[in-house]
Amino acid sequence: MPASANITRAKQLEPTHPTVEGPVIERPAVVGKCDNMCVTVVTTRPHSKSTVRHNSEQDTIIYAVSGNGVLIVNEAVNSELKHHDLAPGDFAFVPAWVEHQVKNDTDEDVQWLMIQNGSTPIRADLTEWGGDVIQSKN
């Protein structure tokens, strides 16, 4: 990949039609620019949550940009779900293949940065915790 600087402006990441785009809006911030990492901006609308998902072979670092949200993880089959409150400035690490979900129980948007160890993000949406893959994105 080319070794040159690349700028993504905040204006480029703003949802064009937030009320139409659904409860969780994902915008590629730095995707396909280098071999070993990518960043996606995820906005979770009030009283919404993402699908249950895992990121296949990619580890993920989550940075809470704004709003107060919850990261829910299922670290093993038949284990109890763990709920982690995340406030602006908090970081979380989600290992590859770990099922997780982000949730917003508040009246304001929650914005997260999802940093994954690949040129483009990989994601598998599941039917439920421990469920079948219903959609894969990469």
Image (cartoon, rainbow, N blue to C red):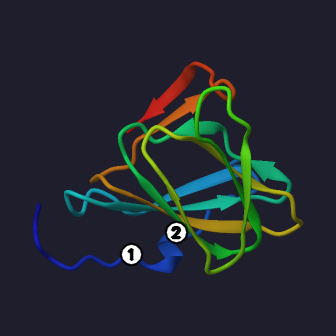
The image quadrant of residue 126 is top right
| Residue at 21% over, 79% down | 5
Label 2: few (<14), some (14–19) or many (≥20) C-alpha neighbours in 10 Å? some
Q: Amino acid at mark 2?
A: Leu
Q: Residue at x 65, y 68 (%)?
A: 111
Of label 1 and label 2, which has the lower sequence position? 1
Which quarter of the rendering shows the C terminus?
Answer: top left
Q: Which label number is shown at residue 8?
A: 1
Q: Is residue 111 above or below residue 82?
A: below
Residue type, label 1: Thr
Find out whether the residues at labels 1 and 2 contact each other: C-beta distance under 8 Å: yes
71 relative to 3 in the view: left or right: right
Vertical side of 32 occupied by 135: above or below: above
Residue 56: x percent and y percent?
Answer: 41, 37
Q: Nearer the viewer, residue 106 or 21?
A: 106
Classify the position of the N terminus by image quarter.
bottom left
Left or right of residue 93, residue 32 in this image: left
x and y percentages locating residue 23 in the rendered image: 74, 49
Identify the residue at the far right of this view. 107
